[in-house]
Image (cartoon, helix red, strand yellow):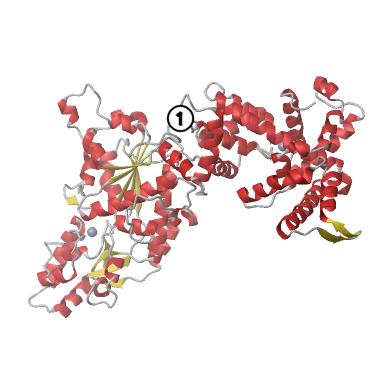
Amino acid sequence: MSNNHSGLSDFEVETFSNFYIPLKFSDYLHQSHPSKNNNKNNFDKIIETSPEALLNAVTGIQSDDSTKLKDYSFFRNGSHKINGLLEVLNNLVNSLYQAKTLTEQNKIPLVTLIGPTGSGKTTLGDSLEKGLVNYLQSKPAYYLVIKDGDKRFPCPYFEEPINVLATNNIVIPNSLRREYIIKDSAELCPHCSSLLNELFTKKVTGENNYTGWMQVFDDLLEARRLTPRSASLELTDKDFKKKFPLVVRNANRGLLHISIDDTNIREIPQINYQLLLKLADKQVVLNDGRVFKPDLTVLLYSNESILMDLAVPDNITMKDFESPRYMPLLDRMLPVFVRRNLSYTCEEDIYKRANLPFDHFWPHSLSSIARFSVSTRIGNEEEDTETDLARLLELYDKFEKMQVIQSDDLKFIKQRLNLEFDEPPVDGWSSGLSTRKANSELIYLSKNNKRTCLTPLIVDEFLTMHEDEFEDNINLIKKHNNNKMLIDLTVGYLSMLNEKKGGLKYLENEFSEFYSLYEKKLMKNIEFIETIKGREKIDDVLQEIATKKLNLGVGAPENLANIIFDFRDKTGKPMQFIDLVEKNSELIKDFKSFDTFIDWNNYKRTRKPSGDDELKFKRLLNSLKDLKYCDNCSKASIDALIEEELIG
Ligand SMILES: [Zn+2]
Ligand SMILES: [Zn+2]
């Protein structure tokens, strides 16, 4: 967890607070008063509890606590962007909604993000915090500053100024209190309360009318723009008890992050749990023994094992049971199960952003590692076969990216994610490889091998590290990789045959010409077109491009309609030549000549081309460069395919 949880540097926090001039207390009251202000809603706008502000920051409007899955744009845009996790985010928003409601009932629920390592709990907390920062920049909130002559005493808890009117030991007429006070306001913190009591007693002499009171207020008080507040603490911190009142102070009117490290959860002193329970009752005992009622949102972070650790064991005594670490604490928690990412395309983006120490990446390396890592988080049941795994990979990728899924499939996914119950999901939970672990394994492989490129061979090495646990997953990924290499090699070889005409570019251009002619023929029923040769039958032109230029088998155009337009319907993109090869490599006529392209038997023995073959081999590697293969990648791919007896 980062130390500066506000997401702002100290300098920015300073600028933020100094940018706005203080508001006169009477103006603050005026702005927050329903009847003295034209806009009645203004009252709610400037006085919000911390959970209310957070909820508004996330939802933009009051949430209606619906059970239908919603896509909150808050999490999809801006600096607090989160990928996927649709149902997790919905649960989180529902918890924030409950937190807001419970705060109105004088409770502070412990919103608990529970999930395995690397599931992104901290990222979620950071996202909420950044959201709150942005919210406070666009929507003013205020805190109390007490004035004594030239001296200024900002409330150490950054309290809402309205609390002055709710504080009993300050001499203010009850009629005035009733006029301005709102239901959520609490008594001022002990510090402000005793200081103000003193100053008011000195200032208030005899009779005062309302105008007189406003003058007293303005002499003694001002409202300043609230800065984003937050603080973090670990429940296992050995000075937890001492630090607790301090972090509550720093996080008041904002977010309090408390992480629970499960490794020594059993050694956490009872007092820490008691302090949390008190906090849940909106009670914090300060170091001088006085009690403060905080206004904050609590975010607890915990590993999935907390559910076991806090569950009541069989052999405990009644005395143990009454201890706060068991049921009472669970009662106060609003659990949000944060599973791991299940979209392999999102996972690939994470690896891309990690700047792994390789000079070059085989174009499918990160995608296959992403597929593998995500697949290990799916389906650890006996009956889940390789086919199910492949299907689930595709379904989850769509679900995470909120693409359309058939209703049966959606139902199936919802079941696996346990959406109907308040329980952790089947997939993306405890088992499997975390992104963090995969990343560090790749860094290790890069250093250990001193290889500059993440070749298919190193990807294999990575997979082999997990063969004891995830054999099925490895088979699935290896098949996928072999297929990708075979396609690339096919396209590379065909490009090489056309290298004088422009290689891959030539093939793609011809295919796009073929594609648009085909479309014309089917959509507009055109039979003849004008070419440089004159008026020609469109079928003849198509046939010529297919067989002579693209080296597609005889009769190809007739076979292609389904493949081409199916692809467009499914992906929303026009097909490219390389996609065609992927969908149907049998159409490629000239790839057959690859078998005799060089002396493969000799290559198999020596793992290098000899004599005339050397130059041909170089030409092939050169053509593969258009497909983003370096020489290392190309050679590793060819060797791997030979090893699997797929070529040669
Ligand atoms: Zn105060
Ligand atoms: Zn490479």
On the image, the x and y values in percent for residue 115 come to: 40, 37
Which element carries disc 1, helix, strand or loop? loop
Q: Left or right: where does residue 524 sit relative to residue 219?
A: right
Residue sitting at x 32%, y 51%: 96
Residue 199's place in the image compared with 385, above or below, is below
On the image, the x and y values in percent for residue 591 come to: 81, 35
The quadrant in which the C terminus is found is top right
Classify mark 1: residues with Cα within 10 Å, few (<14), some (14-19) or many (20+).
some
Whether residue 438 appears in this view of the structure is no
Q: Left or right: where does residue 188 sit relative to residue 490?
A: left
Extreme residue toward the left, this view: 206
The quadrant in which the N terminus is found is top left
Q: What residue type is labelled 1?
A: Ser
Q: Left or right: where does residue 527 sit relative to residue 24?
A: right
Residue sitting at x 80%, y 22%: 604
On the image, the x and y values in percent for residue 136 come to: 38, 62
Query: Quarter containing ligand 1?
Result: bottom left
Whether residue 133 appears in this view of the structure is yes
Q: Left or right: where does residue 155 sit relative to residue 558?
A: left
Seen from the viewer's position, the closer of residues 48 and 264 is: 48
Residue 636, by quadrant, is: top right
Residue under pointer 1: 431
Residue 173, by quadrant, is: bottom left
On the image, the x and y values in percent for residue 404 come to: 51, 49
Residue 324, by quadrant, is: top left
Seen from the viewer's position, the closer of residues 421 and 43 is: 421
Residue 147's place in the image compared with 388, above or below, is below
